[in-house]
Amino acid sequence: MLRGSDSIAEGVSRVKVRIQDIAERVGVSSATVSNALNGRGGVGETKLKQILSLAREMGYVFERNSLNNKDYIRLVIFKRHGLVVMDTQFFAEILEHMTREAKQNGYELLVTHINMEKDQDYLKQINEICMEDCSGIILLGTEMFSEDLRLFAHTKAPLLVLDSMFRHDNYNCVVMNNYEAGYIACERLIAMGHTSIEHITASVRFNNMRDRRKGFQAAMVAHNIALPEDFLWQVTPTVEGAYRDMLDLLEKRKRPLPTAFFIANDVMAVGCVRALREKGISVPKDVSIIGMDDLNICQVTNPPLSTIRVYREDISRIAVQRLVAMMSPAAPKSVQKTEVSVTLVDRQSIRDLNTN
């Protein structure tokens, strides 16, 4: 049986009060409210009391679900270090969309966090999840490697991986098309007259960012543009970490900057733009930037950031619907790996060199 702290959801709302509604009233993220409502850690005592009090006031009535009732889907948020999978708009929206889609299909979405660095008993947690008699399991695999995925090889329930593509492992996966994202971003910079283009990615390994880099490189090859040996810049994938690391990299830079960067996500892009500005490097006059994810912050940065839009609602909907289909006794045994297309969002961070 799962431990009480493993977020056995205690709430089924009798009225249509959304997590987002509570979050807006309290002034916190949807993920923080979800943690509070589902008994997970990471929420301060004062804020926890405020959230629970307001939830009751708004009509969010808590009823304990029985673990003998299989009408729930277990979402496992797996963290190796939590540098990317954290309390951000991207993952808050994923959680919100998946919760809604699960309910529309007759299931509750119950969330468990596993942190390899902080949870000494994470292997025990995984074993409990594998033995759980739930309807299905979705693994948020953003920070997972193949060796982590194999720890879930013996789950009793159908299992699907979200937000990471494991091409050589026998699991159903739903993910944004990261290769396409890198290719589209690079092609846009090339179309704007840039040939000196480099790539900023995370200093820790992720399948998604690997595929973005491959798409970026493929576009450069397709246009016969040579990449320097040191085209890859690596920064910590947080705003502050990217800012700090970018300052250091700019200090050490021996040759001129490229005219453009493709940055592997918007969080890092915000930190890098701040560092460039502090060094007196203007975006887009001196260097152009295109990011990835289309977070709301991209609209209010100076300048507003061009980026690649990820359709988080589509990814969430497809993942839940795929898992529900897998639950059927008549479900095909074949493994499906789905990559959801992305699109370009042009704002003001790319300079058009064709007009010079």
Image (cartoon, rainbow, N blue to C red):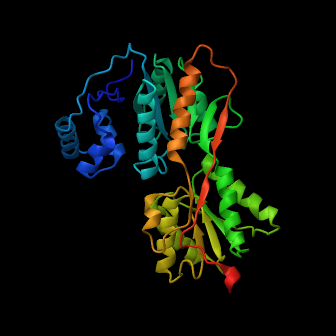
Seen from the viewer's position, the closer of residues 319 and 234 is 319
Image point 71% across, 54% down: which residue? 214
Image point 29% across, 50% down: which residue? 28
Image point 56% across, 78% down: which residue? 284
Q: Residue 344, image x and y in percent?
A: 60, 60
Quarter of the image for the C terminus: give it. Answer: bottom right
Can residue 255 be spotted in the picture? no
Seen from the viewer's position, the closer of residues 112 and 345 is 345
Lateral position of residue 67 relative to residue 277, left or right:
left
Most extreme residue toward the right, as rendered? 224
Lateral position of residue 334 relative to residue 101, left or right:
right
Image point 74% across, 60% down: which residue? 217
Quarter of the image for the N terminus: give it. Answer: top left
- The number of callouts visible is 0
Seen from the viewer's position, the closer of residues 94 and 50 is 94
121 lies above or below 207: above
In which quadrant of the rendered view does residue 193 lie? bottom right
Seen from the viewer's position, the closer of residues 284 and 39 is 284
Q: Residue 74, image x and y in percent?
A: 45, 27
282 lies above or below 45: below
Lateral position of residue 43 relative to residue 58, left or right:
right
Lateral position of residue 256 relative to residue 323, left or right:
right
Q: Residue 262, image x and y in percent?
A: 62, 65
101 lies above or below 329: below
Q: Residue 286, image x and y in percent?
A: 59, 82
Can residue 339 be spotted in the picture? yes
